[in-house]
Amino acid sequence: MNELVRLRSVEKYFEHGVSRNYVLRQINLDIAPGEFISIMGPSGAGKSTLLHILGMHDMSWRGEYWLMDRPMHSLGKKERMEMYKAHFGFVFQSYHLLDNLTVYENLEIPLTYRNIRRGERESLVADVLDRFQIVGKKDLFPNQLSGGQQQLVAVARAVISSPKIILADEPTGNLHSSQGEEIMQLFKKLNAEGTTIIQVTHNEKNATYGNRVVQLRDGWVESQ
C-alpha cells in the first residue's frame, strides 16, 4: 500500500433496542501522504465522527482502518493511542487549551506524552513560539488571549511534535474572517512542507485550500 490512510467498509452506529441508528455507512477512503483533504456535508452527515475515528478518539466502529500499513482495527486501545501520540496533531473548533496552564505549558504538554527530555522540550517550545510569532504570549493564560490567538496556540500545539497528520475540526468556526484566513494560510504552509491535513469544514472558501473534497451525506460518502 502507498496510502497513508486506508479505510474499508468503516461503519459507526448506535443501537436502540433491536434497531441501529447509523452515523457512518460503508466508508471507503484512501488518503495519500501530503494530501490536504476537506470533509464537507450538512450537519449530521458524520463529518466529525469520521475525524474522531481517524484520530483514535472513537474506538467503537466496525470495518478496516489501515494507517501506514498497520491495521488499527486489530490493535488494542493502548496501541492505538500510541499511534495517535506519535503521528497526529488535533485542532479543535473550541481550542481545547488548558485554562490553568500558560501558553508555554500548553505547548509543552504534547512533548511530555512522548517522553522527550526537558532540554529538548525547551528547545522545541522556543522554536514553535518563534515560528508562530507568539513569544510575547508565552507566560499568558488562555483567557488573556483573543480567540484568534488561542487558535494560533492550538495549531502550534498540534504541530510541535512534527506530526505526519493534522486533523482539524471546524478550525476557524469561532474566528473572525481575517483570523480564520490566517489559520488557513498557516495550514496551507504546513501542507506545503509535507504535513497531511484532514479538515472538517462547512466553509466553502476554507475547502478550497485543500486539494480534494470528500462530501458526506447521511453517513455515506457522496463524492470525493
Image: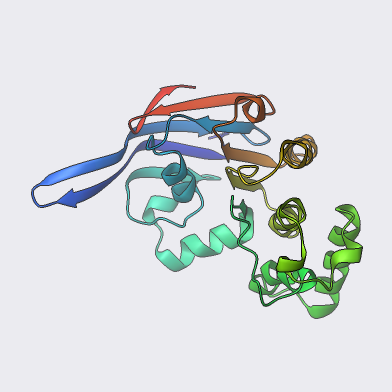
- Could you tell whether 53 is left or right of 60 in the image? right
Q: Residue 114 at x, y = what percent?
A: 66, 70
Which residue sits at x=85%, y=73%? 122
Could you tell me residue 185's position as x and y percent? 78, 36
Question: Observer-nearest residue: 57 or 64?
Answer: 57
Image point (65%, 72%), residue name:
99
Q: Which of 118/107 is in front?
A: 107
At a point 71% along the width and 67% down the height, the residue shown is: 143
Give residue 216's position: percent from left, percent from top: 42, 29
Is the residue 32 above or below the residue 161 in the image? above
Q: Is residue 72 above or below residue 38?
A: below
Which residue is nearer to you in this view: 168 or 88?
A: 168
Classify 212 as above or below 65. above
Compared with residue 70, is residue 80 higher up or lower down, i.e. above or below? below
The total number of labels drawn is: 0
Instruction: Please say which color scheme the image uses.
Output: rainbow
Relative placement, left or right, of 133 versus 187 is right
- Residue 123 rendering spot, x and y as whole percentages: 88, 69
Q: Nearer the viewer, residue 94 or 35?
A: 94
Residue at 32% of width from left, 55% of height from top?
60
Residue most extreme to the left: 18
Give the quarter of the image for residue 183.
top right
- Residue furthest top as drawn: 223
